[in-house]
Every structure is written in structure tokens, then in C-alpha cells.
Image (tube, grey):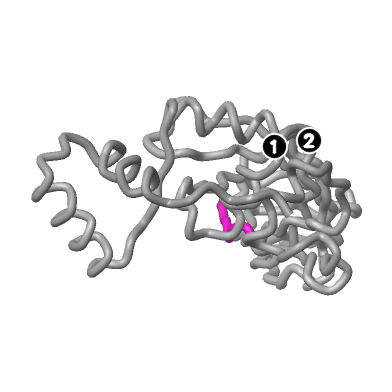
Amino acid sequence: MPDLTFAVENIVADQDAATPLLMFGLRIGCVDPAIVVQSIALRCQVQIEATRRHYDSEEQARLVDLFGEPDRWSRTLRTLLWAHAGTVVPGFTGNTLVNLPVPCTFDFNVAATKYFHSLGQGEIPLALQFSGTIFYSVPDGSLQVAQIPWDKEATYRLPVGVWREMMDLFYPNGAWLRLRKDVFEQLLEFKSQRGIPTWEAAIERLLAGVPQRVPS
């Protein structure tokens, strides 16, 4: 069975995509040069290793919604699932470089979006766990099929700026917030009855009546 290696060489935003999409430049190698990989049906789970990063005071304040107060982080700070991705890898011998597309969302009901948005600068520690099916041929020419072992993985530190630049490209000066339907209907009624022209103005009107938080 082929012994495959995986390494992320770079991550860039796909500026021609219809929705936010990061392209992971993935180097895949086969340790045995006598094996010809015909193709790979590759699957990948991308996780955010939140415990492997330092957070300044501003980031800690913005992450309270996810992990609670910083004095509890020894118990609450945890790895977050970011995305599932997949691609078909063409045939190769030795090694090859492929693009693994990872779709992104700006929905603030998603934990990964809250996490990314809370970071000011620096890098995001990622762990990629691979699975899938390998189609390959051995020296006698026979075609073989095998599963990628569960322990195949790679790590990468994604610059926060790459994610921010991508979201600024697709949603300049904007953000997405999904509301429960009954809450949306209440907001719609509030906006319509008062003749408020935009959703932003309606929310600003509501926030104006909320007392400012007193620092603890």
C-alpha cells in the first residue's frame, strides 16, 4: 500500500470564486517511487488548534462568547472544527502539488467565523486530517485500491491577514448574521412601523436604548 505524505505549502484566497474560498496548496508524496498513483479521492477535515496560540487582552475579550472568561480557559479553550473539504487528485509518481478548496463562511452563528473575526493579527494554527481512497498500480502493472490511514495529517499556521483580506474582498465593510425567523419578523415589524429605511438603522435604534456595559 502506498505510504503517502502530506504538507501544506501555502494558502491563498481564490479571488475568482463566487463565494469565499481558500485554496490550500497541498504537496502529496508517495514514499515508494515504484508505485504509480493513478488517482486519489481525497477527503480532509480542517481543525483550528486554538490552544496552540497566544491571545492578547483584546482578543481574549472578543473570545468570551466562544470560550468564556479567560480565567476559565484552562478548561474551556479547545480545538474547533472549521471545515470538511475534498478533491480528486490526478495521477502522479513521486510527489505532486494540488489545490484543496476549502469553502468559508461569514456567518457569525458559526464558531470558526467568530474565532477568526476575534483575532487581531498573527497566525491561526491549523490541523488537517486526511482520509479517502487511493487508486494505484504496482510494478507488475496491476491496479490496486487502498484507504488512506486515519493517522495521516498535516499542520499549517494561517496568517490572520489572509482570512481578513478574503472577507474584505467578498463582503467589504459588511458581515452576515442569521436570525431565527420569529426574531426576524419582530425586527421587520419594528423597522416597518417606524419607517426606518435600513436594517442597520433599525439595529442602531435598538442599541441606542441599551445601557453601555460598565467595565468590570
Magenta span: chief secondary structure: strand
Query: For the residue carrying disc 2, how many other residues have a C-alpha within 10 Å: few (<14), some (14-19), or many (20+)?
Result: few
Residue at position x 88%, y 54% in the image: 52
Residue at position x 39%, y 47% in the image: 207
Which residue range is magenta in the image?
82-87
Q: Nearer the viewer, residue 51 or 74?
A: 74
Amino acid at the residue labelled 2: Glu
Residue at position x 58%, y 51% in the image: 213
Q: Nearer the viewer, residue 190 or 33?
A: 190
* Residue 139 visible to an observer of this rendering: no
* Quadrant assignment for the N terminus: bottom right
Q: Which residue is mark 1?
A: 25
How far across and how far down the image is residue 69, in percent?
76, 63
How far across and how far down the image is residue 39, in percent?
63, 54
Quadrant of the rendered image containing residue 133 = bottom right
Vertical order, 161 against 46 (above or below): above
Left or right: 136 in relation to 102? right
Q: Nearer the viewer, residue 136 or 103?
A: 103
Mark 2–mark 1 distance (CA, rounded to whole Å): 5 Å
Q: Which mark is residue 144?
A: none
Query: For the residue carrying disc 1, how many other residues have a C-alpha within 10 Å: few (<14), some (14-19), or many (20+)?
Result: some
Vertical order, 108 against 98 (above or below): below
Secondary structure under tag 1 reads: strand
Q: Which residue is mark 2?
A: 9
